[in-house]
Amino acid sequence: MPDSLFGRQDKKPARRKAKGRKAVRSSESRVPGSQDPEPATRNPPLASIARGPEPVEGQPATVLSAPLADRMRPRSFAEFVGQDEIVGPGTVLRQAVARGELTSLILWGPPGTGKTTLARLLAAETGHHFTAFSAVTSGVAEVRAIIEEARHRRRFENQGTVLFVDEIHRFNRSQQDAFLPHVEGGTVILVGATTENPSFEVNSALLSRCRVFVLKQLAAEAIAGILRRALADREKGLGALRVEAEDAALELIAGLAGGDARVALNALELAALAAAPDADGRRVITLAAAKDAMQRRTLLYDKDREEHYNIISALHKSLRGSDPQAGLYWLGRMIYAGEDPLYVARRLVRFASEDVGMADPQALVVAIAARDAVDFMGMPECDNALAQAVVYLATAPKSNALYTAMGGVKREIERSGALPVPLHIRNAPTGLMKDLGYGHGYQYDHDSADAFSGQEHLPEEISGREYYRPGGFGFEREVRKRMDYWARLKAERLASGVRCQVSGDRKQESPSAPTPPPPTPETRNLKPAPPEPAP
């Protein structure tokens, strides 16, 4: 496996032996066939990880041990909270674990929902060796060592290996391909964890060999239960510090954690350590202390990942559905999470033409004004301007007639190509162009009755096509009346045999040869027969 697959690996310079000294052999054991040492602490037991390092005598256990979120990791499925659709009794995964069977899988979900803990439990419950690997900090050397260890363990100890790859989406596609032969050959059971959509971030070849399980954000009630268990647990939690918490404080932490148990436990530990013990040695976490520990909610949002597109889609569909309440909510979710307000304004301008259009032409004016306000003031002052545009667009009459019309035009151009511009409506700035017939026969509409000549402006090949068909809501009712009026007037003039004729610089109306009857709804899109030449 080339080094380039997992990034550049800098080689350490060789150390010189000091004169008069002998090289000391490393005490770390090596796996047969591997170039990397295997530290004795590579895979400590799950219970020891939960306990953390031994405390110093005279110091509380919680102060110097691992973080509370790490100590409180469940050690069995009975302690695992949430994700009942995946690990609940009778689920496919639990049945496979009960049989000691495990296949490669991808765990996809937000932070703090139990992906790492679930991977550890799967390995422990099925008797596999667990090896953690981070796509952020590890490279090709670590992969080689882990694969060699897994081969040795499988051959000589008859034990499989669960290779847990955290942040697997950080690997590029070539790096992900490097796991394929080892997954297919059964050398390792790959358990990947990702916060991003694996459909976009995980190689399709690797994804086809793994089962994807979707983990959801934990409910506030579930997080509150985890916090109470941490307060009561004297071995792993805060029970030894005699910490108590007001119900309102726990509810606030659980509510502001955003479904992330790690965030909640970290805040609980911070508030507990900041609370001064009273005369009886008790520490009480008040509502004020909880607010201070949480500061503010961290919103799940990524400007260029799936959640970004999910929320802008929700905003667009809420406006299309004439729901100003939902529109304001999704607007807030974007701008208060740090989204560029100009991006939101640009999407509102697009919506004004795509989903409101001529049903309310003022919608585009309001959206452009909101864009200008964002550009002029910026956040946080521009949030009300965006909110005003959202409410206006949500409550405006809707029409996608313009959007449909431009789609039809695009398809027409793709089908018929670049048709030539009719000669009579071409520009003729030179004598040569006039001699070639440019502009000849053009009817100046202002010289006609009602300032309307009724002449054709489309190429002959697509004469009579209709792309824009106004709807029946808002201002488009008036637009339809106007279009029907021009169509009727054009049909009447064609029927009466009157058209505009050019005579030098003066334009006048004169009779022409008989013309076909006005188009009916059934024949409106049909190309009419060419009229006889005028006498």
Image (cartoon, rainbow, N blue to C red):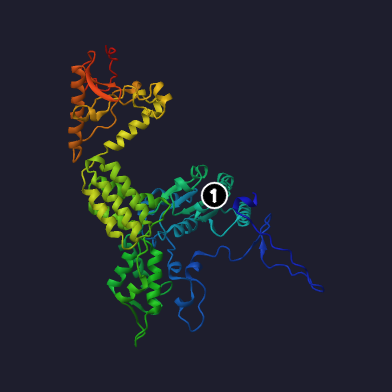
Describe residue 152's horizontal placement relative to residue 13 as left or right: left
How crowded pointer 1 is (Cα within 10 Å; few <14, some 14-19, many 20+) is rated as: some
Image point (56%, 60%), residue name: 137
Describe residue 383's horizontal placement relative to residue 79 as left or right: left
Q: Position of residue 171 (x, y in %)?
A: 54, 52
Q: Position of residue 313 (x, y in %)?
A: 33, 48
Q: Nearer the viewer, residue 461 or 331?
A: 461
Q: Nearer the viewer, residue 233 or 512?
A: 512
Quadrant where the C terminus sits is top left
Residue, far bottom: 279
Where does label 1 land, which residue? 172
Whether residue 197 is visible: yes
Q: Against 473, is 448 above or below?
A: above
Q: Quadrant of residue 271?
A: bottom left
Describe residue 184's horizontal placement relative to residue 533 as left or right: right
Q: Position of residue 378 (x, y in %)?
A: 35, 60
Q: Position of residue 109 (x, y in %)?
A: 41, 54
Whether residue 326 is visible: no
